[in-house]
Amino acid sequence: MYGNQKKTAGKNLVMLTYLIRHDREPLVFNFMFYKPNNEWHIQNFKFGNSIDDELEEASKAYRLNENY
């Protein structure tokens, strides 16, 4: 695994993103978990090779720390 990130929206919604290094290309896995009561449930799962789109979005000027 190359990298991971955790984003939350309150205490009951969490999205985990993992960047996996593969022989052919990097892969991105997104897991969204929701906790309606006492147990976590998978709300959504996505994977793909769109790392170039994500890196381009992350490098936009309004996302850079220097702009905050």
Image: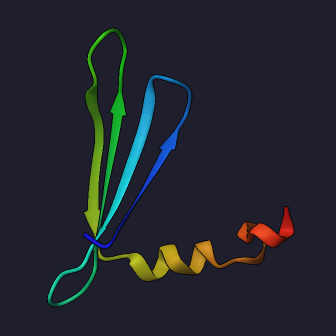
Identify whether 21 is placed above or below 46. below
- In depth, the one of 23 and 48 nearer the eye is 23
Identify whether 32 is placed above or below 40. below
Identify whether 21 is placed above or below 24. above
Q: Give coordinates of residue 30: x percent, y percent.
A: 33, 54
Q: Residue at x 26, y 16 (%)?
A: 39
For this view, does 11 lie left or right of residue 15? right
Q: Residue at x 70, y 77 (%)?
A: 60
For this view, does 24 lie left or right of residue 33? left
Q: Give coordinates of residue 53: x percent, y percent.
A: 48, 78
Question: Residue 52 occupies which quadrant of the picture?
Answer: bottom left
The extreme bottom residue here reads: 24
> Which quadrant would the C terminus be assigned to in this image?
bottom right
The extreme top residue here reads: 37
Question: Residue 40 occupies which quadrant of the picture?
Answer: top left
> Which quadrant would the N terminus be assigned to in this image?
bottom left
Identify whether 53 is placed above or below 8. below
Colouring of the image: rainbow
For this view, does 54 lie left or right of residue 46? right
Question: Residue 42 occupies which quadrant of the picture?
Answer: top left
| Count of numbered circles on the image | 0
- In depth, the one of 20 and 31 nearer the eye is 20
Q: Residue at x 43, y 36 (%)?
A: 14
Q: Give coordinates of residue 44: x percent, y percent.
A: 30, 41
The extreme left residue here reads: 23
For this view, does 42 lie left or right of residue 51? left
Q: Give coordinates of residue 26: x percent, y percent.
A: 28, 80
